[in-house]
Image: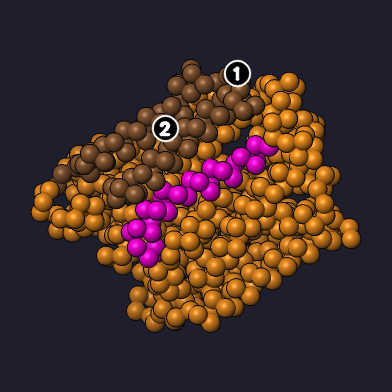
Chain colours: A orange, B brown
Amino acid sequence: MEPWVVATSSIFAYLAVTIVLGVVANRRMAVNLEDFLLYGRRAGFIVLYLTVVATYHSAFAFLGSGGFFYTHGIGFWVAGAWTILVGAITYVLGSRIWALGKRFGYITPADMLADFYESEAVRVVVAVVSVLFTILYIQVQAQGLGYILSVASGERISFELGTFILLIVAAAYLMAGGLRAVYWTDVIQGIWMYVAVWAGAIVITYKLFGGPVSLWRRVVAERPDLLTAPGPHGFFSPGMWFGMVVVLSFGIVFQPHIMIRYYTAASARTIKWLGATTPIFLMTLYIPATFIGLGGALEMPDLGIPDRIFPELLFQHAPAWLTGIILAGATAAAMSTLDSILHSNMTVLTRDIYQRYVAPRATESHYILVGRVIVMILLGVGWILSANTFDFLVVLVSLSGAGALQLMPAIVGVCFPSQYILTRAGILSGIAVGLITLYITLTVTPHPLGLHGGVWSLLTNTMTVLIVSRTTARPSYQTVQRIHGEIERFVYGSEQASS
Amino acid sequence: MRSHFVPRTRDGWIGTIVFLALFALTQPPLVFLVANRIEPRIFGVPFLYMYLLVMYVGMIGVLIWVARRGV
């Protein structure tokens, strides 16, 4: 059987499994908003673990990381640092966000921030920032999916049709089963992507080089420029190294599709162990990507699009059945991120905008219906964005990775009690200054002094928040005591003992 | 209310200091000064790659240690 038939059949078999899971999840779903949007706040360790890692790692980890190693060498191994920081942030901040969500019934990031800073403006700004900077990922993941299906079918399925099919499937199981369907499919997707990328890398490494040691030996002999920083094109300078760690750890964790997952944990113990152990999965996924990228640099040094290195190696050197399974794994990597972003945007728009300002007293089933309609609208937006090229999108996508980073001072101000209380005016002005700085340092004069634009934006944001908060009205004493008191009780057991 | 930016327990201090020290060793300028080279290779793996891997394993070890200690 021809490789493209096996590859395409594997992807469609995988899609059928996700649809079945969506239907089963629908039958288990209770008709209430917490169940539809937050899995009833009872996600256990294994389910939460696999959904977080599958959501964090997207099509980029599967295809783009190999391309990065191919082009820039092992400087990209700095990725391990940001994945471990994700674990530490989950342990320290995620557990506090979980505690506040459970105590006060928060569903979205804006719920928590608007409550503490006593501001509807904060709610709207956070909701807009959350949606604006993640809706672009729908486009990125959808394009990745269309590309994978197009490559797998030997371009018999067009990019546009591939994108459309995969968007429809993701939206279908999300609308059917809510976050439960997303979590269940993420379990399969997480396992599938991990096994697939390791299997592909091992097969290619042994078939082409006789094993990892021989591969390293050849890279040392033929391409030593790939084995130190900043790499052959000077990309991994010290400023870029540090900046990518900050942006791709805090910047990703504060995006709503990750933050909302913290609310869903069954217990504090679940989320702390999640933080302690997710880096094992996240970091080790980049080891096979190293072999693929460096091996590809030796075998196919003139590839026009570096991101194609993994599928190109597979089609030339792996058996058809394995290529099919692995490309289905790539599909899983992209879909697990796509469905989570669709879900988080649906949640933010339903909860923070519709329920708050349009129909505050509707029934739970009404909000679920509205959520499903919003998914359909997002589906249409995602397809239009992915099937066309808009100049402004190129700019927005370049900003998106660091967009959620602008919420960091606000979130730290809620989750870390101190004598210095941040204010709503400080937070709003900080976000505004941070976003302006981000635009300038990523598009007008990219990465001034070699430091990543995201770090510049975080610095100006934080300074603005601190300065403005000194002279503007704090949240009320009762609110600060209520929320910081809960954090104190959660972390140290007794508010009075340390007051 | 006392600040949460400063650990209050011995385990909290140990976990914070060791994690931050290991993290600093993976970041500029230290990583560029002490580890940005190919030789000596360890089990055939270039020094920079193996150095970072060891630091990463150490950082994960700290996270698991604090989880076990209930910090």
Question: Is A448 above or below relative to A113?
Answer: above
| Residue at 73% in and 36% down | A211
Q: Position of residue A49 (x, y in %)?
A: 48, 57
Give the numbered dot on residue B39: 1
| Residue at 80% in and 37% down | A208
Q: Nearer the viewer, mark 1 or mark 2?
A: 1
Q: Give the class, few, some or many, for how many residues have Cα within 10 Å of label 2's Cα (few <14, many ≥20).
A: some
From the viewer's perspective, tell me whether residue A70 is left or right of residue B56: right
From the viewer's perspective, tell me whether residue A362 is left or right of residue A231: left
Assign the N terminus of chain A to one quadrant of the image: bottom right
In this view, the residue in front, A16 or A203, is A203
- Kindly identify the amino acid type of the residue bearing the numbered disc 1: Glu
In this view, the residue in front, A28 or A479, is A28
* Residue A365 in view in this figure: yes
Residue A163 quadrant: bottom right
- Kindly identify the amino acid type of the residue bearing the numbered disc 2: Phe
**Circles 1 and 2 on the same subunit:** yes
Residue A457 quadrant: top left
Q: Position of residue B37 (x, y in %)?
A: 58, 19
| Residue at 39% in and 46% down | B64
| Residue at 29% in and 59% down | A99
Question: Is B17 above or below relative to A390?
Answer: above
Residue contact between numbered discs 1 and 2, judged by CB atoms under 8 Å: no
- Residue most toward the front? B43
Instruction: Please name the residue that numbered disc 2 is placed on.
Output: B23
From the viewer's perspective, tell me whether residue A348 is left or right of residue A8: left
Which badge, 1 or 2, comes first in the chain's sequence?
2
Q: Bounds of the magenta span? A: A264-291
Q: Position of residue B43 (x, y in %)?
A: 62, 28
* Residue A483 in view in this figure: no
In this view, the residue in front, A369 or A177, is A177
Q: Chain of mark 1?
A: B
